[in-house]
Amino acid sequence: MLIWVIIFIKQGDNTFRSVMSKAAKHILIAISIWMVLLILDVFRSGFTNDWLEEVLLKIPLIVIPVYLLFLPKDTCSFANSWLIFTLVTTAVGFVSTVHYWLNYEEINALLLQSKHVPIFGNMHHIYFGVIVSLCIWLCVHFYKKDMHRKIWLVCGILLLVFMHILASRTGIVAFYSATLIYIFAASLKAKRYTILIIGVFGLVLLPIIGYQVSGSFKNKVANSVEDFNAVQSGQDINYKSLAMRIEAWKTSGRVIAKNPITGVGASRVDDHLQQQYRIDETVLYPENRVGPHNQFIEMTLAHGIVGGLLLLFIVLIWLINVKHSPAILAGAVVIIMSFLLESFLERQQGILVFCLFLFSFIQLPSKK
């Protein structure tokens, strides 16, 4: 992608200006400020491996948007690229589901202990759940465009089934949150409020069906209820995913309170967090003292209030830009909800998905 960006730039800046909408410009400026903050962390962290790894991790935040802004939109090759992405996701989901059924009892027992269904290719289960949810909305979007409709329909149905078997709770919560937004957006756009009534009914019915037919979905619900009860009653929260996240959010809040303006530096977040855990004499065992699991908190920890506001600014501009398309809006909500439940942009898996989806569907400055 970087090579193509260099070639595109050599063709002249007129091309770049012709595809640069206000939304794209504002988001790129915000991302550039983020990268500058990362580079300036060197004055706090020094030229250490941790600082260099953090900078290298985030380089796709700059390269991918510029590449995608030059890439022609609304073409067969553009749609087919996302179709390949969705087909690969569906294939991975199919293989992982077969593996789940072959090891049904063993994996279901692990789910009750806050473990996850293994994903083929060793894909991180939280990120895979988000990608599956995202692909479902891609299926809805491209199905409506009358391009390979049967393939998009079959993939969408299969992914909906796989999601209730394979997806992490983050992916499932993100999907249902996006579904609610989609129902409201689609009914308002069509001005047909029967869509709202039918959609809400389906939204209630779908998880009930999933609970009845999917053992893994049922065990995830049971594990979530157990986690919630542990938080409410003050029981031991070790090895309980939700309870551990809540403890991490509280601990992160105390670190932010000590460094509200400048933050602690992206490469030093974990050091400060672990130190705060010790100061607070947390009940969590050392192996359970997890990171923030929230991208907004992660950004504020790393770069202070400025970092948190930068991410919030990107999210708001993005939502305003895609509100015209209910399916793409739903896809954006999937990723934004994952920000609330996971430090989604602290792995390149998350950065790649975020940048690819955001800048692929951002509106151009003109219909041309």
Image (cartoon, rainbow, N blue to C red):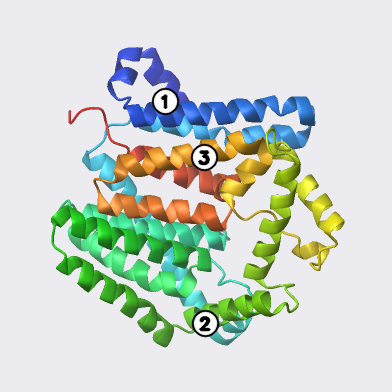
> Is 90 or 60 nearer to us in this picture?
60
Q: What is the spatial separation of the Cα atoms under label 1 and label 3, in whole angstroms?
A: 27 Å
Residue 112, percent from left and from top: 61, 81
Q: Residue at x 35, y 31 (%)?
A: 23
Q: Which image quarter: residue 133? A: bottom left
Q: Which residue is drawn at 80% across and 46% down?
A: 271
Amino acid found under the numbered disc labelled 1 = Trp
Q: Is residue 57 visible?
A: no
Question: Which image quarter holds the N terminus?
Answer: top left
Residue 290, percent from left and from top: 71, 58
79 lies left or right of 34: left
Q: Which image quarter: residue 185? A: bottom left
Residue 102 numbered tag:
2
Which numbered disc flags the more N-terminal residue, 3 or 2? Answer: 2
Amino acid found under the numbered disc labelled 3 = Leu
Check if mark 1's residue and mark 3's residue have beta carbons within 8 Å.
Answer: no
- Residue matched to label 1: 4
Residue 311 numbered tag:
3
167 lies left or right of 318: right
For disc 1, the neighbor class at 10 Å (few under 14, some 14 to 19, many from 20) is: some
